Structure formats: C-alpha cells, structure tokens
Amino acid sequence: MDLPINLILNIAEIGAIYALVVLSVFLSSKIISFDDLTVDGSFTAGGAVVVALLLAGVNAVIATLAAVFAGGVAGLLTGILNTKLKLNNLISGIVITTGIFSINLKLAGANANLGDNKTIFDLLNFAQLGEVSHLIVLGGICLGTTLMVKWLLQTEFGLVLKASGSNPQILTGLGKSINFYKIMCLIISNSITGLAGALFVQHLGFFSITGCVGTLTVALAGLVIGSSISNNLVAKIVLGALAYQSIIALTLELQIEPVWNRLITAVLIIVLVGINNSKQG
Amino acid sequence: MKTFNNKIFIGFFVVIILGALVVSSKSNLSKKDVLTIGVLQTISHPALDAARDGAVSRLKELLGDKVCIITQNAEGSAMTAQNIAASFHNNKQISAVITIATLATQAMAKVEKEKPIIYCAVTDPKALGLVHDKTNACGITDAVDINQLVKRIKMLLPTAKNIALLFNPAETNSVSFVNEMDAILQLLDIKSFHVGVNNECEVSSAATVAFEKADAVVIPTDNTIASVMSVVAKAALKNNKPLFICDDLLFTNGVFGCTGSVNYHEAGRQSADLIMDIVNHEKTPETILAVGPALKKMIVSQKMADALNIKIADTLKNDIEIRK
C-alpha cells in the first residue's frame, strides 16, 4: 500500500497553521465568551503585512513579528469598539474586518507573489531535512505558542482572564477591570491569528486578498472537533485542526462532483461530532 | 483525569484510516491507456466555468473515452486551493494539470514542479514567476492589448477628455489592466479616474457615478462587474455615453465597443490543445511559455454609434468589426 506521504505532509503543515487560528478562537470564544469576527481580518492582515515588508526587503523574522503586531492592533481596536463604544461583540469584529480589508488591499494589493524573497522558512534553515523543513518550523511555532498560552492561563493573569469570561463578578470584587482583561485577551488572540496569517502566506509563497475568507469557519470547526476529542489544550487544538484538514483532504479524494465538496465536509463534521454528543447525552 | 474521549478518538482514527485506504487504492488503480488530467478552477464564475467547459469538451473531443478528467474547485479559498494542489501532486495517475485563473495557478505551481501545468485566464503570468526557461508551466493569458484599445477609443472618440475605469480593486487582473491603461492614457493627455467596487451590489451606484462624470467608461476583464454587466449597460443607455468592455460574450444592448479578443471558452479549448502537445512530447512548457489570446478586431455596435451620434470614420472600417 502506497502511503500518501505528500498528502499527510500537507495536512500536517496546513493543520499546524490553522491550529494557531483554532487556539485564537479558543481564547476568544471559550475564555471570554466573545465571538470574534475579527479573525478573518487579522489573518489576512498578518499576510498583507508580511508580504508588504518582505517585498520591501525587510528581514523575514522582523516581518513576521510585525504581522503579529498588526494582528494585535486589530484585536485592540475590536476590544475598544466593544468596551468603550459599547458596540455588540459581532458588530465590533465585523466593522474591524471590513475596515482592515482596505488597509490590507493598500498594503499588499489584490494578489502578490513572494518570488525569491527569503521567508522565515529560508532563514530558520532546516534545508537538510528536505521536504519536512517547513513542517518542523510550523510545528515548532505552533507547539511553542500553544504551550506559552497554556502557561499564561495558569498564571495569576491567566486566572483572572478566565474569570472575566466565566464569572465577571469576581473581578469587580477584586477591583480589576473586566474591560481591560477582555481587550488583553482580544489582543493576544488576534496576535496569534496574525502570526498564523504570516506563516500561511510565507508557506504558500503568495498572498490573495480574498483567499482567506472563511478562516473563522475553519477555526471554529476545528475547535468543535477538537473539543469533542479531548480536554487537553494542546491535544484539542492540534487534533482539531488536523482533523478538519484531514476531512477536507478526504472530501477531495472522494472526487465527487466539486459542487458537493462543502456539503460532504459538513456531513463528515456532523458525523464526527454528533456521535460523541449523542453518546454523552 | 481522562484527557481523551476514547470512543471518539477511536472513531476518528477509523475514519482517517478508511480515508487513507480510499486514497491509496485510487492511486494504485492502473489505468493503462487512459490519460488522467486534473483541472483546478479558482472560483465558480461564468467566465471561468466557460474556460473549464472549453477545456473539458476539447479533451473529450480529442481523446473520447481515453481521458479521465478530475475537476476541482477552490471556491476562492487559498487553503482549499492548496489542499487540491497537494491532492493533484500526490495523485500519481495525473499526468498534467490545467489551472484556471490566478489563485489556482499560484497554488499548483508552488506545489508541483515536475508535471506540466497549463494555465488559462491568467492575466500576468510573469508576475507569478512562471515565465522562465526552467518552467513546467505554460498557458493562455487573457491580457488585453491595451495599446490597441486606447488607440481605437481615441479614433472613435477624438474629443473624449475624461475616461472612467470601473473595476474591483481586489481583483489582481483588473488592477494590472487599470495601471497599464492609466499610463497609456497619460501619454495621450487623456484624464482617467477609477471607480472601485468590492462586490456586485455596489455596481449599480458606481456605474451611475462613472457615467455621470466621464466621457466614456471602460471595464477590464473583471469578474465582479462581468456578473452584473446588464446593470452597467443599462446605465450606459440611460446616460447616453459610450461603454467599452473586454469580454466578447458580455456584448449586450448598451455596450458600444468590445476588444473582441478574449473568449474564455476558446481559451479553455486552446489549453486542452496545449496539454495534448505536451503530453505527446511534441512541445515542452518552457518553449511555449505564455500565449496571448488570438488578436481580433474591436467590435463596435452600429446601433449604439447611431444613438450616441458617433460617426465611424471610413478609414476605421477596415480595422474594426461593426455589429448591427
């Protein structure tokens, strides 16, 4: 039996990138109960910033960090709209994503090719490992970020953060600002999304302004699947993202007429999550 | 503390293993006489669908039963395009891939460096880094001859001073067209301004603005505007101003001129012919590179010319095709 190594490698690579977005969505939906629609905007912004800087000759590591910063700014703006201007959760996210679209379009154009510019994968050189070099970098960044978040959630800051979502009255009792923690969480989660966007563009080698629409859906699906598999944070996000990518790959291999692909994906997700929920129910 | 829900974990594993078996069994099916071609389309859209249909019908014409065509559609998502590209790259049966429009071509070219890639409906393959002597990609561009277009506009409308360019700035093909056209118009001392729309809903009001302020409106090979061309044509009729478009199939009542060389169905057929040449080892991608659309004359509507009081000079009549 001929193992589809290329396919598995691709699932792992894209899975690692989207695992970061799943982590981000986990932070916003589960920790502070904020359905954050900024994700599409900050994911694209991460890509746009990285492309604009790489094509201007900036070092890839600095460009990637700038993308993280851009994501953070997006999260900050959403947080301010929600807490200070009292805009509803969903509207804040939508407004920022809409506004960021223009900024991204101006920065990177509708479509940009990275060409020969050195990406972060070229700089962190594991070329001797050949085909798995991208995966090593992506996997490392993904695991590293997840473990950092896990550590953060166990610090005093993290505990207050979790409380701001599940039990906000405690914060008022402690004299801490719920708004502050909400904004901090949005900044952190969107920075991570910005990082994912930057890695995505460098991995693919090109940027497309409309190519990242639907990132939130992918991340949420991954989170739902991951949550039904495990309670451990690392396992949840990694397995969830990998599961979703595997489902997409499987749908493609079935080679049924392309119009049905989305429906098949939806059915597979329902089956996977539905079995678990019915057993628990 | 149980960190893994055992039953769902096992169920998940079973699904994945089943999937792997499906995948590998398909790859092992030996189809000796059958040529397998992959077709990767960027998004569902009438022009791109026409290109796909052209390619598929031509391949079936040439090979009949001896071709297996696997079509996939990225539906505009870069992630899906990448997954499909990986799937085609992994599939040993596939001998060559046709990619339709820019996103599909970029995703495929990044992943596949050996099998021939024939692209179709891509405006600027050079910008994608595909035009060099070691390339495995070649194909048909839909680049309009903008020099010729501007020349004809100048001849038909010698007094025009202000031209509006109506397009979606999120479409890379339109952006490169508009930039080139701006440069050429500037040399001829004609002012141009941009009217941008991000989706179909905005086109109606944008078209009104464009026609009110300009002497003529030009629309590039833009997917967003193409889907609501009738709206723009109506605005042209209402404001009694000339409208120039670039896609022959969209020529409707209200359109004054059309460059006449871009036909997506034809482009699809041409790419199928190219694939056959390459698969039969008669040609190689690096010798073909990018082929422009067959140059044809500009098409002008006599009806609109009369309505707009534009006299088509006799000297022009050899260079353009007049449609009643």
Image: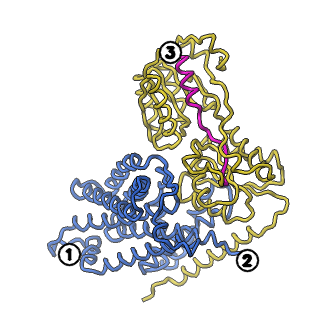
Circle 2 SS class: loop
Same subunit, tags 3 and 2: no
Chain B on-screen colour? yellow
Circle 1 SS class: helix
Q: Amino acid at mark 1?
A: Ile
Range covered by the magenta-colored residues: B135-157
x, y percent for residue A108:
43, 49
Question: Disc 3 marks which residue?
Answer: B158
Chain A on-screen colour? blue
Q: Chain of mark 3?
A: B
Q: Image quadrant for the N terminus of chain A?
A: bottom right
Q: Please name which of the two marks, 3 or 1, marks the residue nearer to the observer.
A: 3
B211 w.r.t. B115: above or below: above
B193 w.r.t. B316: above or below: below
x, y percent for residue B101:
60, 46
x, y percent for residue A79:
27, 59
The answer to which of A255 and B167 lies nearer the viewer is B167
User: Is residue A110 highlighted in magenta?
Assistant: no
At 70% from the left edge and 74% from the top edge, which residue is drawn? B21
Q: Amino acid at mark 2?
A: Met
Local crowd size for mark 2, using a 10 Å CA cut-off: few (<14), some (14–19), many (≥20):
few
The answer to which of A56 and A38 lies nearer the viewer is A56
x, y percent for residue B262:
64, 34
Local crowd size for mark 1, using a 10 Å CA cut-off: few (<14), some (14–19), many (≥20):
some
Same subunit, tags 3 and 1: no
